[in-house]
Image (tube, rainbow, N blue to C red):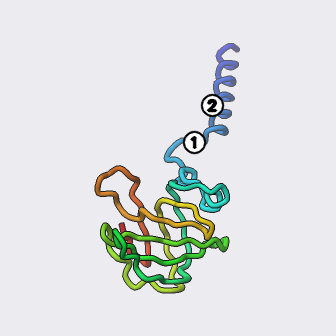
Amino acid sequence: MRNRAHFIASTGIFALLFLLYGCGGQPDEKAQHPSIAKAYAEQLSGIQVEGQGRVVRILPDDREGSRHQRFIVTLNNGHTLLIAHNIDLAPRIINVKKGDSVTFSGEYEWNSEGGVIHWTHHDPAGRHPSGWIIHGDQKYQ
């Protein structure tokens, strides 16, 4: 009787821990990054985010300091972002045009127009999380 009660109690504790913490394995990728909507609403900056959007405007390259390829994307929720992709550290995104879908990972900086995503590339010094942009079947970092 004692072994049976111990088994039931142990099983109950395991089931409770399973419900509270999940089944283990790799953490959910999205759980590691706050949402862009939350970052915008709370005026957060300097945080790593991931997202996907449709290119709505291509801007001229920023040539002051490090050169950046720039374009504006709209997310599914209507939020707009400026993507500033450093082309001195990463390859230029080839043939990106209005209407294209892009997936990205980078650092979010708040501004009143929706925010900027930068660090969409590797950090040669290794001090910053690597970002990337996927356009078509090509990953740029």
Query: Where residue 46 appears, x then y in whole percent?
Result: 50, 54
Instruction: Identify the amino acid type marked 1.
Output: Cys
For image coordinates 68% across by 20% down, the residue present is 4
Q: Is residue 29 left or right of residue 127?
A: right
Q: Nearer the viewer, residue 35 or 80?
A: 80
The picture places residue 21, in percent across and down from the top left corner, at 61, 39
Q: Is residue 72 above or below residue 107?
A: below
Q: Which quadrant, please, contains the C terminus?
A: bottom left
Q: Nearer the viewer, residue 95 or 9?
A: 95
Q: Indicate the position of residue 77 as horizontal and vertical percent values.
A: 67, 71
Marks 2 and 1 close (CB-CB < 8 Å):
no
Which residue in the protein does label 2 denote?
A: 14
| Image quarter of residue 112 | bottom right
| Number of numbered discs on residues | 2
Secondary element at tag 2: helix
Instruction: Kindly identify which residue carries mark 1.
Output: 23
103 up-or-down from 19: above or below: below
Dot 2, crowdedness within 10 Å: few (<14), some or many (≥20)? few
Q: Quadrant of the N terminus?
A: top right
Residue drawn at point x = 40 percent, y = 79 percent = 61
Q: Residue furthest front?
A: 64
| 68 vs 108: above or below | below
Q: Amino acid at mark 2?
A: Phe
Q: Position of residue 122 (x, y in %)?
A: 34, 60
Residue 42, relative to residue 95: is it above or below? above
Q: Nearer the viewer, residue 29 or 8?
A: 29
**Structural distance between the alpha carbons of marks 2 and 1:** 10 Å
> At 61% from the left edge and 68% from the top edge, which residue is drawn?
114
**Image quarter for residue 133?**
bottom left
